[in-house]
Image (spheres, helix red, strand yellow):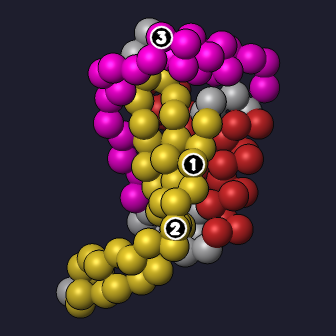
Amino acid sequence: MEFIQVMTTTGTREEAQAIARDLVGKALAGCVQIVGPIESTYRWRGAVETSAEHLCLIKTRRDLFPRVESAIRERHSYETPEITAVPITQGGTGYLAWLAEALSSPA
C-alpha cells in the first residue's frame, strides 16, 4: 500500500477545517493537520503577492489522490488552489497500520 501526504493552503482556518472534516469524514484522509497562519509569497497574474494562509497536511493513499483532489476543489475558494502530493516512503509500523485502517473505514 502506498501512502502520500497531500498539501493545500487556504485563506482561512475555517476553510481549512471544513476541508479537513470533509476528507476525514469521507475516509479520504486518515488525518489532516492544519498549520498556520503561515506567510506565503508567490507570483499571481504577473505580480508578487504575500498572503497569510493555513496549510493542510493530508495523509492518504496514493490511489485516493483523484478523489482527494476533487473533494478539495469542491470546498476550496481559490481559483487555482495548491494541491500537491509527496510520497510517504517511511513511517512507524503502528502509524501506517492505523492509517491503512482509517482509510478503509466506510464513509
Q: Which mark is residue 93?
A: 3
74 or 105, which lies in front?
A: 105
Give the side of residue 106 with respect to residue 66, left or right.
right
Residue 56 higher or lower than 12, as above or below: above
Give the side of residue 57 with respect to residue 2, left or right.
right
Q: Is residue 73 visible?
A: no
Q: Amino acid at mark 3?
A: Thr
Q: Amino acid at mark 1?
A: Gln
Q: Which mark is residue 36?
A: 2
Between the residue at mark 1 and the residue at mark 3, the CA separation in whole angstroms equals 20 Å
Residue name at image x 24 percent, y 87 percent = 48
Region of the chain picked out in magenta, as a range: 82-107
Number of marks in the image? 3
Q: Which mark is residue 33?
A: 1
| Mark earlier in primary sequence (3, 2) | 2
Q: Amino acid at mark 2?
A: Gly
Q: Quadrant of residue 62?
A: top left
**Does the CB distance between marks 1 and 3 fall below 8 Å?**
no
Instruction: Check residue 104 for magenta coloring.
Output: yes
